[in-house]
Image: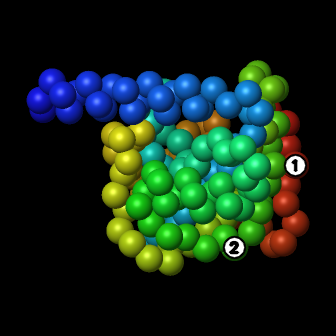
Amino acid sequence: MSLRKKWFTLVQIAYDLVMKLNPRKLAAHAVIQDERGRVLLLRSRYADRWMLPGGGLDRRENLDAAVLRECREELGVEVAVDGLTGIYYHAHNSAYVAVFRVRLVSGEVRLSHEHSEFRWLEPEELPDRTRPMVEDALRYEGQPILRTFG
């Protein structure tokens, strides 16, 4: 990779990291399953961990618009929202996360510069911090769950 390309990648990652420090601390994330029931997770470059697709809301953006935009930006796909499955308060950083169950409508997964790889995982293989939100989404029957995590 050329020095110029490395520089632009570094600038993009730094910009995204600053944007992730959203002072409103409100995010929207997607639970997407494949035909085998596995859940899509992304490996973040800025946090070096596995997470659901999604991110912070833009100014004056609503939750469902944010999850659609994040899937388009991070995955290069169009999704449809099946439902808001839960709202989670993370006390350790005073942040709220809205989780949606969505389904792929069109496109093949193409990662943005924010993520280094993606995997489809069985629900029981998910990281401990993600599993409760995904399990709530998979059990969703029309009533969102409200939870607090320490």
| Residue that numbered label 1 is attached to | 146
**Residue at figure coordinates x 55%, y 25% from the top left:** 18
Q: Is residue 24 visible?
A: yes
The amino acid at mark 1 is Leu
Position of residue 25 measured from the top left corner of the image (x, y, whole percent): 74, 33
Q: Is residue 92 above or below residue 72?
A: above
| Relative depth, front residue between 85 and 45 | 45
**Residue at figure coordinates x 77%, y 60% from the top left:** 85
Mark in the foreground, 1 or 2: 2
| Relative depth, front residue between 34 and 116 | 116
Question: Mark 1 or mark 2, which has the lower sequence index?
Answer: 2
| Relative depth, front residue between 90 and 122 | 90
Position of residue 44 measured from the top left corner of the image (x, y, whole percent): 44, 36
Look at the image and tell me in which quarter the C terminus lies: top right
Q: Is residue 19 above or below residue 55?
A: above
The amino acid at mark 2 is Asp
| Residue that numbered label 2 is attached to | 82
| Relative depth, front residue between 69 and 101 | 69
